[in-house]
Image: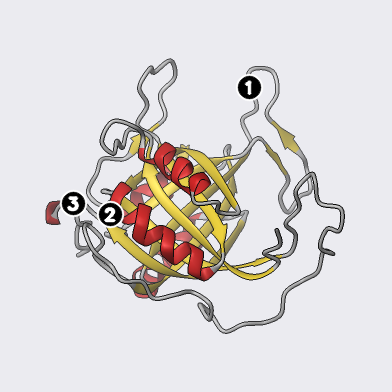
Amino acid sequence: MSIQGEQILLRAYLESADRAPFTPAAALLVREARRAGLAGVTVLRGVLGFVGREPILRRRAWSIVERVPVIVEIVDSPNRIADFVAASVNRIVANGIVTLERAYVMMYRQRQDKDADALKLGGVFPPLAAVPHLELGGHMKTNEEGTLLRVFIGESDVHEGRPLYEVIVERARALGLAGATVLRGSEGFGANSVVHKAQLLEMSTDLPIVIEIVDAAAKIDRLLPELDAIVHEGMITMEHVRILVYRHNPEDAPPTAP
């Protein structure tokens, strides 16, 4: 099987406690994607985040039932992703944010492949050129172009004595953005090229942190001056995405920024 070339990456921003109705929504998405024969699925667990008006979620030590952010990433062709949204995503995801974006697949190899695709860079495409417009229903509310902002910092970065990633998430929520998720890495390096690893029972205090924030470009733009003032070392990237927003009811809509 080869899907090398321009494809679609679907991201579902959920929380681990979401049930649809008895199994975690993230687990159901993985199961349905495998049943549908999609090319690949990855589940990422966060440490902090929010969706709409929901309280900020935090990973707690020794907790049996966690309410932590979860991201499910699925890559495949536009038609297969569109079919999956209609058949499964629209039924399973009752609360959260789902985005679609372009993903140029440079390599897709399976162990049994004898003639694997050669690794090569993709060409230049207009933003969202291959992202399909989907027929929405159920809890799905919007089908609009938006921005995915990623902030790459270190876990030890602080602002006024508090973890910088906490400050960024709180400011995004205060500005009425739709959601934010904090992901903690296990190894990495930044501009100073010092490699940091998670070792000895997770005692490292400067592991990589990625904050993902999704919303319309105009709302993301309101956050940029805040980031400019408090992020003194790191990297910030943006990508064009198509946003499919799910909410349980109108009361879950994010607060309107003053």
The amino acid type, in three-letter code, at marker 2 is: Ala
Task: Work out how far the residue at label 3 is from the one at label 1, CA to CA, in angstroms.
Answer: 37 Å
Asked whether the viewer can see residue 215, the reply is yes
Give the vertical position of 93 relative to 156 (above or below): below
Counting residues from the start of the chain, the first of labels 2 and 3 encountered is 2
Give the SS element for disc 3. helix
Q: Residue tagged by mark 3?
A: 252
The amino acid type, in three-letter code, at marker 3 is: Asp
Counting residues from the start of the chain, the first of labels 1 and 2 encountered is 2
Residue at 21% over, 58% down: 138
Please provide percent x and percent y for residue 177: 31, 60
The image quarter containing residue 217 is bottom left
Give the vertical position of 174 relative to 122 (above or below): above
Give the SS element for disc 1. loop
Q: Residue tagged by mark 2?
A: 174
Q: Nearer the viewer, residue 12 or 4?
A: 4
Give the vertical position of 48 relative to 247 (above or below): above
Counting residues from the start of the chain, the first of labels 3 and 1 encountered is 1
Give the SS element for disc 2. helix
Choose mark 3 or mark 1, whichever is in front: 3
The circle on residue 203 is 1
Please provide percent x and percent y for residue 55: 26, 40
Residue at 18% over, 51% down: 252
